[in-house]
Amino acid sequence: MRALLSKQVGGPETLELSELPDPMPSPGQVLVAVKACAINYPDVLIIEDKYQFKPPRPFAPGGEIAGVVEAVGEGVQGWSTGDRIMGTIGNGGLVEKIALDPTRMFRLPEGRSFAEGASLVLTYGTTIHALLDRGKLKEGQTLLVLGAAGGVGLAAIELGKAFGARVVAAVSSDEKAEAARQAGADEAIVYPRAPFDKEQSKALADQFKAAVGPQGADVIYDPVGGDYCEPALRSIAWEGRYLVVGFPAGIPKLPLNLTLLKSCDVCGVFWGAFAARDPQANQAHIDHLFRLWEQGKINPRVTETFPLERGGDAIAKMAARGAIGKLVVEM
């Protein structure tokens, strides 16, 4: 089988298309023919050895897949050859075949493409956990979403609207603002590119405050970080919740006096650890997502697909923060 492998630390240009023996399912595993693998920002970090987990090399990046069960190992129940699946695997997805623990898999509904299936669980799973468990988002509250045109950003808009919130989307271009509005954002604002000096930071804070309104944002969803963090926090409501999701713009240094002045919470969001520590709660969230998907309230937006040999191009586009919606590698 073919696999796109990281054999050395570096950017997407270091990935190598290689031939590997077909895997075989061990007892308790299934063999999946991978049809699609979504690209997410952790794929940028993991090949640069900047992610929380550092798998031994060589490894394939790609943590979100969909495909077809090709073989079932001894002792596996409930899965059969030909079943369509979707799931999250941490890494290893940019391959043509993979042996998996079935606990990482969900059934791909009929009528849904493999590209859509590969784009749901990680992105929306992270976001539903963030908004409900960490953000305590309630109907009628105001949600400010940074980086709102990316995969998790669009998921936050859709879920925020599904939960009855007023959603303000913040993005870096007019094209991305239009994508946010199409996803259901009540308002979209375009912010400038960082870095910011003191006056620019204040101007952005004023822009956020004007957009969320005089009461402030009850929940701020931040998958961006960097110089955008402090201006956004200055627009938070009394006893608001600031959700720390990711840092493609850099890890911010937060002046903690702002948390005192607003009596607000800064909440880390680590969905992978949550799913491992409380699988029942995570499964309830996934079931909720599948209902919303069936109702048409959420729909992963796949904006570009790449063949396996160009998987590095997909990761490079993600690294450049040029993606709108989801980028997917198809096998």
Image: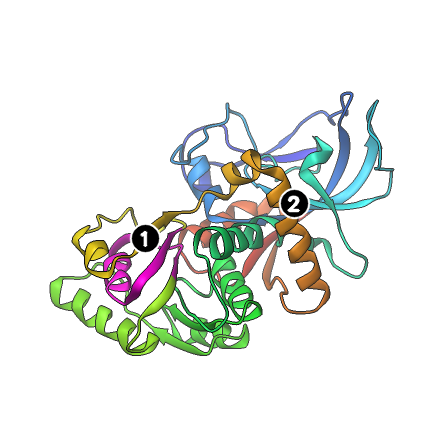
Report the mark closest to the observer, 1 or 2.
1
Q: Nearer the viewer, residue 266 or 324?
A: 266
User: Which x, y percent locates residue 324?
Assistant: 49, 64
Q: Is mark 2 on a helix, strand or loop?
A: helix
Q: Does the magenta stretch include residue 229?
A: yes
- Name which residue type carries label 2: Gln
Marks 1/2: CA distance?
Answer: 26 Å
In this picture, which residue range is highlighted in magenta? 220-244
Q: Is residue 200 magenta?
A: no
Taking the spot 70% from the left edge, 30% from the top edge, the residue there is 101
Q: Quadrant of the N terminus?
A: top right
Taking the spot 42% from the left edge, 36% from the top edge, the residue there is 51
Residue 265 is labelled as 1
**First along the sequence among labels 1 and 2:** 1
Q: Is residue 213 above or below residue 29?
A: below
Q: Is residue 247 visible?
A: no
Q: Is residue 143 left or right of residue 23?
A: left
Q: Is residue 62 above or below residue 55?
A: below
Q: Is residue 161 left or right of residue 292?
A: left
Taking the spot 75% from the left edge, 51% from the top edge, the residue there is 108
Residue 283 is labelled as 2
Q: In which quarter of the image is residue 174?
A: bottom left
User: Which x, y percent locates residue 110?
Assistant: 81, 58
- Name which residue type carries label 1: Asp
Q: Can residue 19 be seen in this view?
A: yes
